[in-house]
Image (cartoon, rainbow, N blue to C red):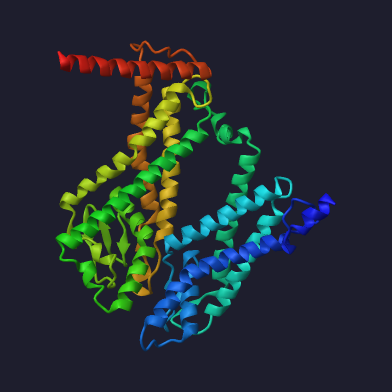
Amino acid sequence: MRHMTQLMGRPILEVPGELGVRPVPADLLAGVRMALVGLAVVGVPVLGLWVATPNADNGAAGATRLAGALWLLGHGAPVLRGGAEAPLTVTPLLLGVLAVVQLFRAGARVAARRGLRSRWGGPVAVWAGYCGVAVAVVVHCAGGGLFRSRVLPDVVAVGLLAALAVGAGVRSAATSQAPTPRAETDARPVLDRLPVWARPTGCAGVVRRSALAAGAGLVAAGGVLVAVAAVSDAVVGGGRGMAVLGRGSTAVVALVLMAVVLLPNAVVWGAAYALGPGFAVGEGTVVAPGGTALGPVPEFPLFALLPESGPGGWRLAVVVLPVLAGVVPALLLGRAAATGATDEEPWHPAATALAAAAAALLTGAGAAALAGLSGGALAGGRMAWLGPVPCWTGLAAAGWFAVVAVPGALLVRYRALSPGSPEPAALTGRAGRVRRSAWLLRARVHAAVVRLSGRAS
């Protein structure tokens, strides 16, 4: 009777062959629902603008094709534009992030619900449902219109992105359900080739955190540059970006929405600018702190924020931003080196430098990937490439991080383990870390009291 009550209280799609396990059709419909939600996020504004536009040339089919093309672009799928079939490959990162977050969470939920032993049946169903909608969108956009899809490349691009995002979610759920020491031994095959004293034991976690902190600092630097450029254009430049918007209310809303969608791309370009290599806005152009060489650019609000052609001059000061972005990772690495990442002996200076170099390489790889995703072709000919060059951006990010983080981590480690300090540096293990933290707190309180008493006297 109890089992009958449980079954009667379940929806039809929740009746599995084994109680407590979600059926495959429900996961398939979950993937379809996620794809439709993403399409709605893009399609509702497009259809609203089509309704509000007087004397629109294309019908509703043209508006839906435009929405589908934008949705495909958000997944990194190439699209053809115009009668000349000019390539359009610039990925709106905001739409891509929304899709990845949705798929990642879906993979994690399905894997956690099904458990570790049967975790792949549900994620594959979610992926299949998502890709089924993608196939329908690609076929719909393959007809005539201003924007047209490329059937095979677009399906492959959407399927690959969905597989990577869902797989990452499954792996995250598996790690949270059954933690293993693998995260601490990911670099063991490489470290085993080094002398014992040069091995940063348990460095995988702190290296990842340091790289993420450096990446967050670079993204913040790019955001600051975009904000400063917008304020400078409004105050000093006469509002060139606002002048582009004077084309009627519908055109203003459309351009503002496109600018918001492409704002993360602009932030990545700003980070590449701060790193030094800069970015291009067409063949034979460069926008960098050392100088800017521009030709005619499309009329778009974000392009109005570009600096004018000429030498860099005072703009070279922006290179201080990557230096600041490396301070927090240096502190993380230095503290881990002083205390030992896994309750063991403090790292040797060579091991500390090795961990900082590994974090620098990871940061450079992430910067190169973001630079490649944020750029692409806007048309054929001169506009065949816009955005940063991935290899130069990655090398600059790794170089700046290494220059700041390696000596910074060594300095933090030296101050924490200095011989003149009464701190018990020889202690290891969890008890030693607790005693060292308590000593640092007492020392800071004592120094503050001494300063206050000196000022009072």
Residue 343, position as x, y percentages in the image: 53, 22
* Residue occupying the point 44% across, 79% down: 85
Q: Is residue 304 above or below residue 187?
A: below
Residue farthest along the right direction in this orientation: 1
Say which quarter of the image contains residue 355. Answer: top left
Say which quarter of the image contains residue 401. Answer: top left
How many dots with numbers?
Answer: 0
> Looking at the image, can residue 276 be seen?
no
Q: Quadrant of the C terminus?
A: top left
> Looking at the image, can residue 236 be seen?
yes
Left or right: where does residue 115 sit relative to residue 78?
right
Residue 76, position as x, y percentages in the image: 48, 64
Residue 375, position as x, y percentages in the image: 39, 62
* Residue occupying the point 36% across, 51% down: 393
Towards the viewer: 297 or 35? 35
Towards the viewer: 78 or 285? 78
Q: Is residue 187 above or below residue 364?
A: above
Residue 107, position as x, y percentages in the image: 61, 53
Left or right: where does residue 59 sit relative to residue 301?
right
* Residue occupying the point 56% across, 74% down: 137
* Residue occupying the point 46% across, 70% down: 42
